[in-house]
Amino acid sequence: MNEDREGLDQARLEKGKESYTIPVGPINVALKEPLRILFSEDGEQVRDVDIKAGYTHTGVENIANRRNPIQALPLVQRICGICSQVHGFTYTRSAESALDIEVPERAQYIRVIMQELERIHSHLLWAGSAANQIGFETLFYYIWKERENVMDALEYVSGNRVNYEMNLVGGVRRDLTPERLEKLEEALKFYEKIYQEVEDTILRDRTVKMRTRNIGILEKQEAIELGTVGPTARGSGVKIDNRSDRPGSAYADLNIKPMTPDRIFGETHCDVYDRLAVRVKEIEQSIDLVRECMARLPEGDIAHEENLVKLLKDLRTRSGRGVARTEAPRGELFYYFHKKADQEKIQTLKVRTPTYGNIMSLRPMFLKQQIADIPIIAASIDPCMSCMDRVVTVKGDTTKTYTKDELVELSKKKTRRMKNG
């Protein structure tokens, strides 16, 4: 880290400008997970940024490749505790695409209901955390108190407050009984009742607006060029949403429009406030989607095969490659699944999470901003380091840092190996 800091300082001095550096992380109070960001400052203004991730690599993909499709499911759902449902949903869709498995329509609707409930929970959790970053502790406690209701509903349906374990290759594990539907109805009525108060408290509070308006700007073209996804991209006016662009499962039956600032305010500033507004309005959108899915919930089976022994026997004989792209609360989640015939274990599993797509957008957001705004700007992409970190190369006692060209060439070689089986 000292070498990085000296290099950044020297680069600034060579340009004839005095500067100093502020190392943030890898362990820091702004984020609950390790991320190292090195800021070059001129007075109170950020002049340059160096971002380094990779401190929480857990080897999930490698572990999954030593398991069968059923055993891998609890593993991938633990990539992220906040997004466990969408990880299970996307994984099963990639496996079903690869292995040619039909999913009952009722199961598809149950999956979407669970996913939109998880989106409500995720956005409320993020809004509370964002309030904490700007020192608005009253709002933090208020929002986190209100998110308990959706967590109670998810627990009643699945049995778990975190890692819901609802998904199964070919369907879902648990049905929505009349009692569970009644509990969900109570949760929806609760959030419909308090939603306007939540929106007014967050979006119309003078303190919140002063701390987030015209802060951390990511222009629309920059968001597109950097491959930004989810609410971070939509906050810059990019109209992308996999729920409408590439609808899978019951999303194909729903009319979903990407939530962007111009729909909310009639204009786009591409700042932290716009990203905040997008997430708040998506809570309302998810409430409506859950209610619509409950009203249209069809009768029928909930799984291709509920008996896990029979299911594994069936999966063993199947083979293929499949991909799935899903709109997680943070943005597009991508899974690649490959299994060979007459082989129980997964051949290849690849995951690309939203934070991987959004992390580089932090650099233009930070440039020319004040030091005091660093925490809320970093939080505005809703980062999840545990989701993102995937690769560490260690050989003996040495580590290797790959250049961009080397990584591209390694990716091409891996693709060729996969195509050749």
Image (tube, rainbow, N blue to C red):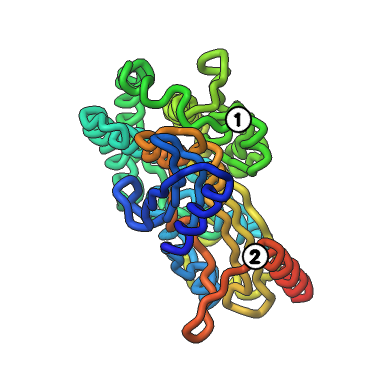
The residue identified by callout 1 is 219
Q: Compare marks 2 and 1 and give the one earlier in the sequence.
A: 1
Residue 78: x and y in percent read 41, 60
Residue 301 showing in the rendered view: no
Distance from the alpha carbon under mark 2 to that under mark 1 = 27 Å
Dot 1 amino acid type? Glu
Residue 419 falls in image quadrant? bottom right
Residue lying at the far front of the rendered structure:
16
In the rendered view, tell whether residue 184 sits above or below residue 392.
above
In the rendered view, tell whether residue 98 sits above or below residue 196.
below
Residue 319 showing in the rendered view: yes
> The C terminus appears in which quarter of the rendering?
bottom right
In the rendered view, tell whether residue 37 sits above or below residue 347.
above
Residue lying at the far top of the rendered structure:
266
Q: Nearer the viewer, residue 93 or 309?
A: 93
Residue 246: x and y in percent read 67, 40
* Residue shown at 60% from the left, 35% from the top: 241
Residue 198: x and y in percent read 32, 22
Q: Is residue 207 left or right of residue 330?
A: left
Q: Nearer the viewer, residue 159 or 72?
A: 72
In the rendered view, tell whether residue 206 sits above or below residue 42.
above
The residue identified by callout 2 is 403
Dot 2 amino acid type? Thr
The numbered disc on residue 252 is none
* Residue shown at 64% from the left, 43% from the top: 227
